[in-house]
Image: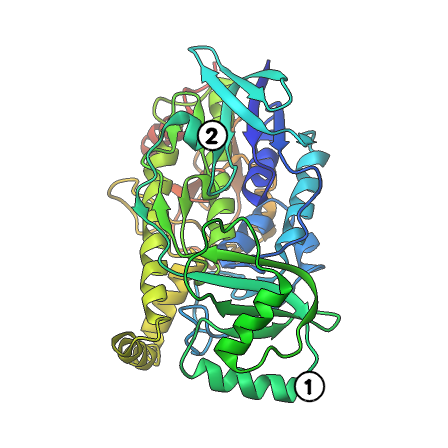
């Protein structure tokens, strides 16, 4: 029997596989597509996702294949300066295609021993007290202790579980493609600037090798958005909307997407869990979707591994839903708000002008960017120190960097007093005695996902929190 089967080999599933393998969990990733996708709908990692890659020692691989941007326009495309004083050591967006992100995460998970099986389409499941039985479309039957559905917005796992997916259906559709153009950059820029005066949902941006990413609102809703527009249909829509088709040709790919907004009622049903788009869908405004899924996996991985390995305290696995469901609800709300600001209706345009003015205030600008980049996320751990529940940014220590100590995915007691102890939890928590001029607290206990579980200097209080998050002491 396997420990965990992950349905879906996108960024969420691959991130989760890597997290589980850090703890020795036997993992199989099932991806129904035979070959990696050629499309890159997502083009970047926000600050919190960049931090996650740094926490696991992956960031140099991503930086080598991406480009840093500290640029405006991430909230509803409204131009505003990149804010100062963001609470992160990575105050930028990393431009990197989704295809590259998936490849790097697959290399990471595979290198740790995860099995990734392409052409493995999940068709049925059942569960009992001991595990989950998974039926594949080719007739194969597999057995695992847990199953995680990371299989996208049309999740088969969620459907088989019967988990409700309430929200709003799509009311508009957008066409997106990567194509070559037959006009000069100057001609293209002039048309785009004119059209965007009245429609923030339209855009043309250069990619590489003469290819442009083109986005244009559709005229109505299609019956099946899985069927992409043809090149001729795409050209015709550009002429209708922008007055020119820019001579687009030689498409790499063309697709369509809607603005449906839905959130799964539950992230866990017995031994089956949901993550990424299987748990939530929303418009792509702000570029949060891929990032939200990676962050789901980072929260879930160590908790599920603790359950598999037998040391999880009561309620730890259920805390995945309790912590991540509200985060997704907040993302759905901010994408709803951004979508309204992208409307061409007179009222929406008036509100957009007002929000543009408000973004001129540094505090407002910083607040919204921290929301988009997820560095303001705080889980509810109860009353306590102001750091409690927040992820701790990378800080410089006397003997190195904080995040360099977190590559193995274990808990971490950073002790600036030298008087504390994590004896009894040494198999799950690293005790590091070091100091940082950037950290104004005697000691902090970090969960494997980098969120502060405790701060202070009282040993008995610390022992209570070690047991709360890392189970009973050994011996």
The spot of residue 387 in percent (x, y) is: 35, 50
Q: Residue 157 carries which label?
A: 2
The reply to whether residue 389 is in sight is no
The reply to whether residue 438 is in sight is yes
The residue at the point 61 percent across, 84 percent down is 188
Residue 370 falls in image quadrant: bottom left
Near-viewer residue (110 or 97) = 97
Q: Residue 404 carries which label?
A: none
Element on which disc 2 rests = helix
The residue at the point 55 percent across, 24 percent down is 4
The residue at the point 44 percent across, 37 percent down is 419
What residue is pinned by disc 1?
184
The spot of residue 350 in percent (x, y) is: 27, 80
The spot of residue 55 in percent (x, y) is: 57, 47
State how far apart marks 2 and 1 are (Cα). Answer: 47 Å
Whether 468 is drawn above or below 239: the answer is above
What is the image's colouring? rainbow
Position of 467 compared to 209: left or right?
left
Whether 458 is drawn above or below 37: the answer is above
Residue 248 falls in image quadrant: bottom right
Crowd around label 1: few <14 · some 14–19 · many ≥20 (10 Å): few
Which residue ends up furthest to the right in the rendered image?
A: 209
First-in-chain label (2 vs 1)? 2
Residue 382 falls in image quadrant: top left
The spot of residue 103 in percent (x, y) is: 69, 46
Quadrant the N terminus occupies: top right
Crowd around label 2: few <14 · some 14–19 · many ≥20 (10 Å): many
Element on which disc 1 rests = loop
């Amino acid at each position: 029997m396997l420990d965990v089967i992950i349905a879906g080999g996108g960024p969420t599933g691959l991130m989760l596989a890597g997290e589980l393998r850090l703890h020795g969990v036997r993992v199989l990733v099932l991806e129904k597509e035979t070959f990696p996708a050629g499309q890159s709908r997502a083009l970047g990692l926000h600050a919190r996702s960049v931090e996650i890659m740094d926490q696991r020692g992956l960031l140099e691989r991503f930086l080598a294949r991406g480009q840093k941007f500290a640029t405006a326009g991430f909230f509803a495309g409204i131009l505003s300066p990149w804010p100062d004083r963001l609470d992160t050591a990575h105050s930028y967006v990393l431009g990197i295609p989704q295809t590259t992100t998936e490849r790097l995460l697959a290399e990471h998970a595979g290198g740790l021993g995860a099995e990734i099986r392409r052409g493995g389409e999940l068709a049925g499941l059942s569960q009992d007290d001991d595990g989950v039985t998974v039926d594949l479309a080719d007739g194969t039957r597999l057995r695992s202790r847990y199953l995680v559905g990371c299989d996208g917005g049309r999740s088969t796992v969620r459907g088989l579980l019967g988990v409700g997916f309430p929200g709003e259906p799509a009311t508009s559709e957008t066409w997106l493609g990567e194509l070559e153009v037959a006009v000069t950059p100057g001609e293209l820029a002039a048309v785009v600037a004119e059209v965007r005066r009245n429609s923030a949902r339209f855009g043309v941006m250069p990619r590489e090798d003469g290819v442009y990413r083109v986005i244009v609102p559709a005229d109505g809703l299609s019956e099946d958005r899985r069927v992409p527009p043809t090149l001729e249909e795409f050209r015709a829509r550009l002429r209708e909307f922008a007055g020119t088709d820019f001579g687009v040709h030689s498409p790499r790919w063309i697709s369509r997407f809607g603005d449906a907004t839905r959130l799964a009622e539950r992230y866990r049903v017995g031994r089956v869990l949901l993550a990424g788009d299987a748990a939530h869908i929303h418009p792509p405004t702000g570029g949060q979707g891929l990032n939200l899924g990676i962050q789901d996996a980072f929260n879930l991985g160590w908790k599920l591994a603790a359950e598999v390995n037998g040391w999880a305290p009561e309620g730890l696995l259920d805390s995945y839903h309790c912590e991540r469901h509200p985060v997704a609800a907040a993302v759905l709300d901010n994408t709803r708000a951004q979508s309204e600001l992208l409307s061409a209706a007179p009222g929406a345009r008036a509100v957009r002008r007002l929000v543009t003015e408000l973004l001129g205030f540094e505090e407002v600008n910083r607040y919204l960017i921290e929301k988009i980049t997820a560095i303001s996320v705080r889980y509810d751990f109860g009353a306590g120190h102001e750091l409690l529940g927040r992820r701790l940014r990378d800080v410089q220590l006397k003997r190195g960097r904080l995040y360099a100590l977190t590559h193995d995915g274990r808990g971490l007691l950073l002790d600036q007093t030298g008087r504390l102890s994590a004896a009894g939890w040494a198999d799950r928590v690293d005790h590091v005695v070091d100091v940082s001029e950037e950290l104004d607290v005697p000691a902090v206990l970090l969960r494997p996902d980098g969120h502060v579980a405790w701060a202070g200097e009282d040993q008995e209080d610390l022992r209570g929190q070690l047991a709360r998050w890392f189970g009973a002491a050994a011996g």
